[in-house]
Every structure is written in C-alpha cells, then in structure tokens.
Amino acid sequence: MMLLLLAMGIVAQAQTVVSLNGEWQFFYAKDVEQADSFAATGFQREDYKSANFKLTPVPSNWAVLGYEEPVYRGFKDDKASEGFYRLRFRTPEGFNGKRVLLHFGGVWNSAEVWLNGKHLGRHDSGYTSFTFNITGDLNPKGDNILAVRVRQVYPGYKTDTYDDWTLGGIYRDVTIESMPKKRWIDRVAINTTFSNDYRDGELTVRTIVADKNKTTLPGNYPSPGKPYKLRFLLTDEAGKVIKDETVDVKARASSSRETTENIHVPNVNQWNAETPYLYSLKVELLENGNVVQSYNQKIGFREISTKDGVFRINGQPVKLRGVNRHDEWPTVGRATTREHWLKDLKLMKAANINYIRACHYQHAKGFIEMCDSIGMYVGAEVSLGGAGDQMYDPAYSPAVMLRSSNSLHNMCNLRT
C-alpha cells in the first residue's frame, strides 16, 4: 500500500523538548517463558533492583548489539526473544505544571510502557511513532523511572515483517515535551498552491488551539472564554520577512478552535529536486502579550499533478529515477542517524537518483526532512507487510487504520 507524496519536512518545537536517548538498563529474555518470568518480578517498580540489567544504548537494535543472531523475515513457529528497559531520569526544569507528552519515534515491534510504576499503555506497531500523555505523572522533585517491555511477536506482528530483517528494540528517539497545560497549539496543517501561472504562491495555514479552560457551568456552551493571539511569521532562506501578522482569536473554552491564515507569496521560489528551496514558517501562541508556545516548520511550494497522463512537478514533466531504500545501516540496524542519512543521499544524488521509495514503512522523520533540504522526491509506504490473509480478517482493521493514519499524519504536514 503506497502513498506517492513529496514529504515537506516538519520541524516541530513546542515549549520544551528533552531527549531521553542514552544509556538505559536492559535485560534480554531469550523466549517468552523467560520474559514472563522476569516481568513477574515487577521490573517496572520504582524500587526494583536487579543485577541482571546491562547498560545498553537507546536508540538501538539488540540483535545488532550481539544479544542474538538477526532473524530474517519473521520467526520460526512465531517464537522470539523480548527485551526489558529501564531509565532513571530527573524531571527537567520548567516541566512542573505543564502539559507533558512522552514520545517514542519507533519501537520494534510492541511496546508496553510504565512511568513511576503506573501503566501508561501498550503500542502494537513496529514502524509507527506513538505518544503518551504523562501530565501530572512526573515527580515534581526527584527522579522518575521509565520502564518498557518490548515484544517481537504478538497477534498480527507479521504486518511489520517483510523481505527484510526483523530487529527488536527501541530504535528511534525517545523524548518528553512540555507545553501550556490549559491552552496549547494542538495541530498545524499546511497547504501550498500556485496562482498567476505558477509565478505566485498561496500558503494556507490551519492552526488548531486546544482550550481546557473552564469559565462556565457544564451545558452552557459555547462559553466565550479568554481571547488569545496567534502570530504567523514567514521568512525566505535569506531571512527576509514575507509575512508577519498577529491575529486576535476569540476563545471557546473547553473546546478547540481552528484559525486559518492565508499568505500570498509573490514571485515564489518553487521547490523541486533541482532547486529545493525552503521557506521558514513560525506560528506563535501568545497569552497576555507573551509567547507561551511556538511551532516551526520548513515550507516548500510544490504541486504534484498528472495532466495528460504525465507526472508533473509544478506543471513541468518529471521523470523519476528511483531506488528502494530501507531505513537501516549495517552497523546500527534501524537506529540510523543524520550521518547515515547524509551518506545515503549524497551517493544517490551523485548517481542522478531523484526519487526514493521508502520501503516498506515510515522512515525516520529526520531523514524525510533531509530529503526536503537536499532535494529528493519520496514515495512513502504504509506499513502493511507480510500479513497475508490477515488483510481479509476484520479483526485486524484497527491495525490497518493505525498504520494508515500514521502515514498520512507524518507525510501531510500535520502535528499533534
């Protein structure tokens, strides 16, 4: 299942984002019996102590680190090893009293998560990012214990197996993000079009602000609430201001409101693989004249069409010269970094390649952003691999919808 899209990269920044990457405690269980036995010891408890853990880097894949031999295309008799992780970290300064989210960029293949002994939930999908709301769950002062059980086999795990290696582990970034607790930027959606025979650009920015302030009794909706401001700043690559406008927004307490901003860009610089020109957009949420949250994104003006049966970028015929690419590297598995991405893209550009089929799952967000900046077309696939007849079983519909919506979300300029 494939989406042919040019992915305009997202650089999202809320009030504070803190990385939890680094050395974690890790226990390797060779099979489910050993895993269940270890889980029964209460490894997620704050006071848990065990000499069985080893320090292991996150992100990583444990097979690449030598815990086991890598397995190709699924597991014999659907039996596989599991991994247990623990991390102790202090609550970052300024996070108390904020809305806080815990983000996982990717865990293969199933992650069950606890924070300070509280069960946050479980995510069954190896190539989709996921988030937990941990507002109020961090210790105001002192340390926190984050615990994760990673399974490689669960009902439907073959959806994430392909003609490729199966590599267990927390293999992408783990971060925590803070933002205002009562009112915050919940989503920004971007759309670019052209006018005046492709000479001018039209940018539409749809910003949804969530509002949990309560000013009236239940049932008395809509309640007016307290107004706020949104600032929209668009600059070109040289830093020249194209648009700087602050708008007043009438609040709607205990609800969300969408604000649409239209920005006209005369003599626009078009984005394509030969001239990957990117503008910078900043959206700021202002309360009482102060910026309480900001959102930043690179913007490329481009249009994909198939007029007269010909594939076109910005109205001009384009021939795609492409390759398949897995988001992995021999020495690190799927825990790839900017260095690996840049090496890949430089080699491809030198070979006159202008298109990547991101097989067969969502690649790292940073890689897509680098494709935008260096000039590379991307075809993004939905992670629906070797599940076979499961595709015809209605019981697997939620898994299909999860992967499909995640792909659209990541590739269509959305943020939550």
Image: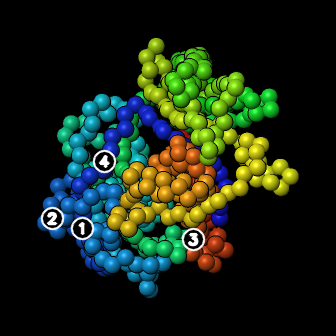
In this view, the mark in front (4 or 2) = 4
Q: Give the percent coordinates (x, y) of residue 165.
A: 44, 73
Please report contact status of discs 1 and 2: CB closer than 8 Å, yes or no.
yes
Q: Which amino acid, by three-letter code, is at mark 4?
A: Leu
Residue placed most toward the observer, 161 or 397: 161
Q: In which quarter of the image is residue 398?
A: bottom right
Residue under circle 4? 20
Q: Earlier in the sequence, mark 4 or mark 2?
A: 4
Q: Which amino acid, by three-letter code, is at mark 3?
A: Gly
Residue under circle 1? 27
Vertical placement of residue 276 versus 184, above or below = below
Residue placed most toward the observer, 223 or 369: 369
| Residue located at (20% from left, 61% from top) | 55
Gap between marks 1 and 2 measured at Cα? 10 Å
Vertical placement of residue 414 versus 81, above or below = above
Q: Give the percent coordinates (x, y) of residue 413.
A: 59, 42
Coloured how? rainbow
Question: What number is the disc on residue 385?
Answer: 3
In this view, the mark in front (3 or 1) = 3
In the displayed orientation, state which residue is furthest to the right.
Answer: 308
Question: What number is the disc on residue 50?
Answer: 2
Helix or strand or loop: what does disc 2 sit on? Answer: loop
Question: What number is the disc on residue 284?
Answer: none
Residue 228 seen in the figure: yes
Q: Which amino acid, by three-letter code, is at mark 2?
A: Ser
Gap between marks 4 and 2 measured at Cα? 22 Å
Please report contact status of discs 4 and 2: CB closer than 8 Å, yes or no.
no
Gap between marks 1 and 4 measured at Cα? 18 Å
In this view, the mark in front (1 or 2) = 1
Q: What is the crowding at mark 3: few (fewer than 14 residues within 10 Å), some, or many (at least 20)?
A: some
Q: What is the crowding at mark 2: few (fewer than 14 residues within 10 Å), some, or many (at least 20)?
A: few
